[in-house]
Amino acid sequence: MKKLLFFTGDIETQGYFSMQIAEAMQSLGHEVFIYDLSRPWESTEKFFHFFEKGNTALINFNFHGMSGEEYFLDENGVTMWDALDIPSYNIVVDHPMYYHHFLEKVPRNYHHISIDRTHEAYMRRFFPNIEHSAFLPLAGTKLYPKKENVPIVYRKYDVTMVGNYCTPGTFDKYITRIDDEYTAFYHGMIDDLLANPYKTVEEVAEAHLRDELGEVPHEELKKTMAALTFIDLYVRYTFRGRAVQELADAGIRVHVFGDGWELLDCKHPENLMIMNNLNSEGCLKKLCQTKLSLNVMPWFKDGAHDRIFNTMLNGSVCLTDSSVYLDEILHDDVDCSLYSLSQMEKLAETAGNLLADPDRMQRIADGGNEMAQAGHTWAHRAKVLHHLIEGDRG
């Protein structure tokens, strides 16, 4: 069994994911080392006592440990992973367009893992030299694995939304930074995505670029994609805000746990219960007391989000938009409740009908819990990683 290195001490959610995978890997027979990025020099010293040449691998998220941190570079700029010949399995939980600068200089024995199949396709197209090891959707955690979930009828919150909010206007400085022609061009892409939310950002961007410029050289197209992350953020926050607005303005009380929600413009702000931002465990505690958990996918069009499986595993009903992958695994009114970004005006009616029927909600919550327990915990994802790392692709 390989010895495995994981990171904590930077992005809290990704550290939490790492701990869930590390625990599961230990149960599969691996020795693990948790490197605290907030105490790098101390952790490095301890890691060298743990390290075994030819039998150690790194599992990380979003390029932690390979983002130019000085404590992972020698005097010649060689990374620790190359110097010690440590393979890295990097789970990238955002679109690759956010990470072109890191993808251009990955370690020698680097394995890229995507949480969305459109991200896989993007990597094959624009970074064909990088080994893509697996499609690994995000997974969920049951906070109290040995306890029964609280029945729906006894839960404290009618509807919760766990996540931050940012006004789309925040990104205007990127949209208007050049001139009126570029501003109109960017807004054309945004309008296309808002009208056709099943499309990916890269799909819309390429179509608009070709309409405007004709044939676009591959390298120029690749460079342009990396400069359009603000469009991804604009549309995801537009729909996240719209979903909460639809519920609050229809008279449904929504408890939001995250930053920025005081900036959301509602006709009935009295129905928007703005709570504190929470860490991963805090979010799970709230899901344990939630009847209906609202999810808006962060523009993953062929993947999943951990909010979905966290919701199910902790006994709440998941109210979510879908994706190609989710259409394969979810069943409306059986293990979740689905709504469409193209028909947001129906969202409040869907939520209201659910809240008026606790028995129906309990049936869906039970179905979701059973479905997630059967295949969508971090222990399930750890088994996939185990086979990759041990050289058995199943």
Image (tube, rainbow, N blue to C red):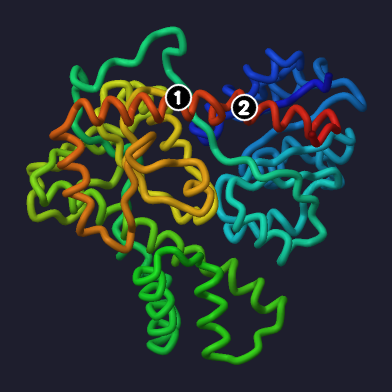
Q: Mark 1 highlights which residue?
A: 370
Q: Residue at x 38, y 31 (%)?
A: 311
* Image position of 29 (left or right of 294): right
Relative to 92, is 359 on the left or the right?
A: left
The amino acid at mark 1 is Glu
Considering the image in quadrants, where does the N terminus appear?
A: top right
Q: Single out the mark in the foreground, 2 or 1.
A: 1
Nearest to the observer: residue 67 or residue 25? 25
Q: Position of residue 20 (x, y in %)?
A: 57, 23
Q: Which residue is mark 2?
A: 380
* Among the 4 quarters of the image, the one containing residue 341: bottom left
Q: Would you say residue 20 is visible in this rendering?
A: yes
Distance between the alpha carbons at the discs numbered 2 and 1: 14 Å
User: Picture coordinates of residue 347 (x, y %)?
Assistant: 23, 51
Q: Are marks 2 and 1 in contact (CB under 8 Å)?
A: no
Q: Is residue 261 left or right of residue 12?
A: left
Quarter of the image that includes the C terminus: top right
- Determine which of the numbered discs, if any, sits on residue 285 in the image: none
Q: Answer with the quarter of the image where residue 121 lies.
A: bottom right
Label 2 or label 1, whichever comes before in sequence order: 1
